[in-house]
């Protein structure tokens, strides 16, 4: 079943679940899982120059060559120390693109805000990625509501379309009380990283109880809670074919409202 979410105000949609690449241990095993996912309903992946010193970007490049770029919306992230100048941003971006084997990515994010430069400066040098054709869209990661509010005022020629943050059914108060309402109002997509809390959600007694009630796995319950929110995409990490099949089974349905309310109170 089709289960899509918008990328900001772009009128472009991707699957409500993507795949993350942080801390992959077995790239051969992960490649099989990623290719299966991209052939079975998932169409977006997330990586970063920081992950395994660039090896995760190289891995995504291999996956893309196996399935075709037209099948994949690619997000990568730049470390904040590159945000000195337009030239340093472009140099870092070209290094990422070289590892990915691409001329351009769909979405480039600032991995976290630099404390050395103003938000306005960071966004203005970062938007050169779009004007130079190295990225179709730009966004941010780990920005607070106040930082995001400042960031969306800064671009001259493009818009901030995504804020990628730590968000899960067990780690949600700040996101749901402050960030999510602001993002909905401004049509900014939230990408939720660490949505499974490294497996902790699968062991939580309330989530386990609910999973039995709705006949879904605890992981499916935890992910479905997130994608039940408008403009939220969850990006779990996996390198297991069995796990990726379980993740795909999260899409195409929604938890009942009373269950969502119960999970919100956790």
Image (cartoon, rainbow, N blue to C red):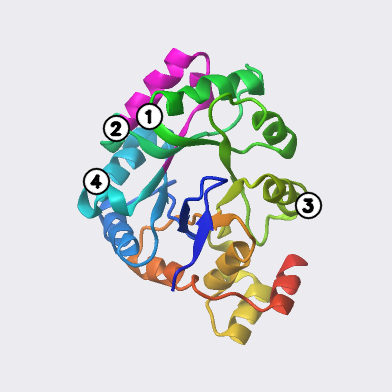
Task: Give the Cα distance between marks 2 and 3.
Answer: 39 Å
Q: Which residue is mark 2?
A: 103
How many C-alpha atoms fall within 10 Å of the one at disc 3: few (<14), some, or many (≥20)?
Answer: few
Q: Which residue is mark 1?
A: 134
Nearest to N terminus: mark 2 or mark 3: 2
How many C-alpha atoms fall within 10 Å of the one at disc 1: few (<14), some, or many (≥20)?
Answer: many
**Image point 48% across, 60% down: which residue?**
17
Residue 175 image offset from top left, x and y in percent:
71, 50
Task: Give the Cα distance between marks 2 and 4.
Answer: 15 Å
Is 56 in front, or is 140? 140
Give yes or no for contact between labels 2 and 3 (Cβ–Cβ under 8 Å). Answer: no
**Image point 31% across, 56% down: which residue?**
30
Q: Is residue 28 visible?
A: yes
**Image point 64% across, 62% down: which residue?**
229
Q: Which residue is mark 3?
A: 177
**Disc 2 versus disc 3: nearer the observer:** 2
Nearest to N terminus: mark 4 or mark 3: 4
Q: Secondary structure at mark 3?
A: helix
């Amino acid at each position: 079943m089709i289960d899509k979410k918008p990328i900001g105000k772009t009128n472009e949609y991707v699957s409500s679940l993507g795949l993350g690449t942080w801390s992959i241990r077995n790239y051969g095993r992960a490649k099989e899982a990623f290719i299966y996912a991209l052939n079975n309903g998932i169409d977006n992946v997330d990586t970063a120059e920081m992950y395994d010193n660039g090896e995760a970007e190289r891995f995504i490049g291999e996956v893309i060559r196996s399935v075709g770029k037209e099948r994949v919306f690619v997000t990568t992230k730049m470390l904040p120390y590159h945000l000195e100048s337009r030239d340093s941003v472009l140099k870092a971006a070209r290094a990422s693109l070289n590892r990915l084997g691409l001329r351009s990515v769909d979405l480039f994010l600032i991995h976290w805000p630099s404390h050395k430069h103003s938000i306005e400066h960071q966004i203005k040098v970062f938007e050169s990625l779009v004007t130079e054709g190295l990225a179709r869209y730009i966004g941010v990661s780990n920005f607070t509501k106040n930082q995001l509010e400042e960031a969306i005022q800064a671009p001259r020629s493009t818009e901030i379309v995504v804020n990628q943050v730590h968000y899960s059914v067990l780690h949600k108060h700040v996101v749901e009380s402050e960030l999510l309402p602001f993002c909905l109002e401004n049509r900014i997509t939230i990408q939720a990283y660490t949505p499974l809390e490294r497996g902790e959600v699968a062991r939580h007694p309330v989530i386990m109880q609910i999973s039995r009630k709705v006949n879904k796995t605890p992981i499916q319950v935890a992910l479905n809670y997130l994608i039940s929110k408008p403009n939220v995409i969850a990006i779990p990490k996996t390198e297991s074919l069995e796990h990726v099949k379980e993740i795909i089974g999260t899409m195409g349905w929604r938890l009942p409202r009373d269950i969502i309310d119960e999970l919100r109170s956790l």
